[in-house]
Image: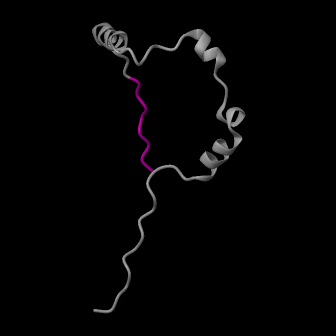
Amino acid sequence: MLQLERRITFPTPEEDAAINAGIAADPDTRELTDDDFARMRPAFEVDPRLAEFLRREPAGRPAPTPPSAAPC
């Protein structure tokens, strides 16, 4: 089994400045604050039905179906 190494590439200070400038320029978005993170709750506490749906539904693409074996 092939195992891939996970790598996290952090932005350079210049890239980080460009990202933050983009956030500041967009009136519809903002960085989350520590208070925002403190108020967050797990999905199952907010809406147990949604959490159950997400647990049941498989993630990703559906499995391919084999072509039908129709006679020629």
Residue 33 placement: quadrant: top right
Query: Which residue is located at x 63 percent, y 43 percent?
Result: 50
8 relative to 44, above or below: above
Q: Answer whether residue 3 is magenta in the image.
A: yes
- 65 or 38: nearer the eye? 38
Q: For the stretch drawn in magenta, what is the main secondary structure?
A: loop
Q: Which residues are magenta?
A: 1-8
Q: Does residue 35 appear left or right of residue 67 in this picture?
A: right
Residue 63 rendering spot, x and y as whole percentages: 45, 62
Please give the count of numbered marks on the rendered protein: 0
Residue at the outermost front position: 27
Query: Which residue is located at x 57 percent, y 52 percent?
Result: 57
- 31 or 13: nearer the eye? 31
Residue 70 placement: quadrant: bottom left
Q: Does residue 15 appear left or right of residue 58 in this picture?
A: left
Residue 25 rendering spot, x and y as whole percentages: 32, 11
Residue 69 rendering spot, x and y as whole percentages: 37, 85
Residue 24 placement: quadrant: top left
Q: Does residue 34 appear left or right of residue 21 in this picture?
A: right
Q: Answer whether residue 15 is magenta in the image.
A: no
- 52 or 72: nearer the eye? 52
Residue 11 rendering spot, x and y as whole percentages: 34, 15
